Amino acid sequence: MDTRRRRRHTGALVGAAALLAAALVACTGQAGTGTAGSGSAGAGTTGTTGAGALTDRAPCPGSTGFTCGTLTVPLDRTGERPGQLRLKVAVAGNAHAPRGDLLFLAGGPGQPGVPLVSRIAQRLAPVLGQYRLVMVDQRGTGAGALRCPALQDQMGSSDLAVPTAQAVTDCADALGPDRRFYGTADTVADIDQLREALGADRLTVDGVSYGTFVAERYALAHPDRVARLVLDSVVPQQGYDPLDLAALPAAARVLTDGCHADGCTTDPAADLAAVVARYHDGPAVLDLLTSYEFVDPDYRGIPEALHQAAQGHPEQLQQDIATTHQGDAATADQLSQGLHAAALCADGRFPWGGADTAVPDRAAALDRARQQLTAAQTWPFDAATATGLGSLLSCLPWPQEAVPAAPPAQQALPRVPVLLLGGDRDLSTPLEWLHQEAASAPLGQVVVVPGAAHSVQSHATSDVGRQAVYDFLLAPDRSGPVTG
């Protein structure tokens, strides 16, 4: 690699780290709780101070036009385990918006919503004359983040970084038995309580990444309480695949397209396969790629690093991996890895089953799954990559516990308008997942943004995706009867 090219590559990686850090820093502001009785009409609550209303209402610090309050929800909705959680909520001041409430759900799982409200309001500005924007810190995030210091330090904002088993078990021990109350089903119930507190019959929901999964599960649980759904960077309703068998082969397509866009002359898919076979570093390379997409969906410089590594010179690739891992640092307030593990392990369906499978039985089941994987399923990666990702290994030693019931496989979403939005360079939530969920949306509309990666509304350089969201949210409502 010549010096000028190397400088551009290193600069892009520094930019990737800076962008990830900036996105996370945007999450660090704390929503003010104000004092009891300091509400305003702009909060848009039912006007009561009962258990279902928003309390402690006051202007959101640094977010003009928004009121922040607290939604108090039960820790355990069965009532067997006492306790309450206080969730921060930000609500725009236009309580009588013609088209009602627009709830924007952040991702992760583990990312708060309230500290992002000003940024999201800027992105959605063209529709906010018609909608009242609402954002919530889902349980276990933000000021109420689940805190696991060692796991947080090892994973930061990454889904795929591989933690030590000790960090995982220390986290589970620190959270104790209450960890089972932080799955998606609990968040879905919180959202419906929020809807009641807002005085809304139905919600329009815009979810990004894990937020799409929450939105889908809410729509399946309460089909008569959703008006429209925006699903940006789609996780299908059955949840993420812990083996990542959509993302692994998608890497060949994404890298090749990025290479062509940048005018490179190598074969990045073949080089990636050679690197994984030679260095057995598939999980670290996939983690690099899914982080890098946020700053440069063309992956400039990555094909060169892969080509050099395939030729026996891995120094640049190793430096890229190390730099990106450093840039993934995040606090629990920014993205709680404790909540991330608790939610994924509660919701996930793994090669060994769910969290109700005895821990000693899991490793053998994972090994059997690895032996059954074929090259066609994983290339340009390998079976060891599929069974060695941090999102899966975080749940391997997670304590045995009961799991919530999942909806039937590929249940139809309600007959309401659904926009499914994705970028063709996304490896975090590859397009294959989008099309899988689109098959379950009777009134679904698919928009794929060329050259965009994860979180189209926030990160795409093109306005194509954002304009599609505006047009969709402002379109006349022609949905048919809601079905369960």
Image: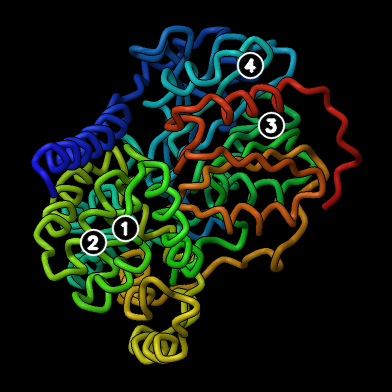
Q: Amino acid at mark 1?
A: Thr
Mark 4, other Cα within 10 Å: few <14 / some 14–19 / many ≥20: some
Residue 182 visible: yes
Element type where label 1 sits in the image = loop
Mark 2, other Cα within 10 Å: few <14 / some 14–19 / many ≥20: many
Give the image location of residue 293, x and y in percent: 36, 45
Give the image location of residue 354, x and y in percent: 49, 75
Which of the two discs, 3 and 1, labels the residue nearer the N terminus? 3
Mark 1 or mark 2: which is in front?
1
Residue sitting at x 12%, y 55%: 316
Marks 1,2: beta carbons within 8 A: yes
Q: Amino acid at mark 3?
A: Leu
Residue wearing tag 2: 307
As drawn, 250 above or below 366: above
Q: Amino acid at mark 4?
A: Val
* Image side of residue 170 versus residue 201, left or right: left
Residue 398 visible: no
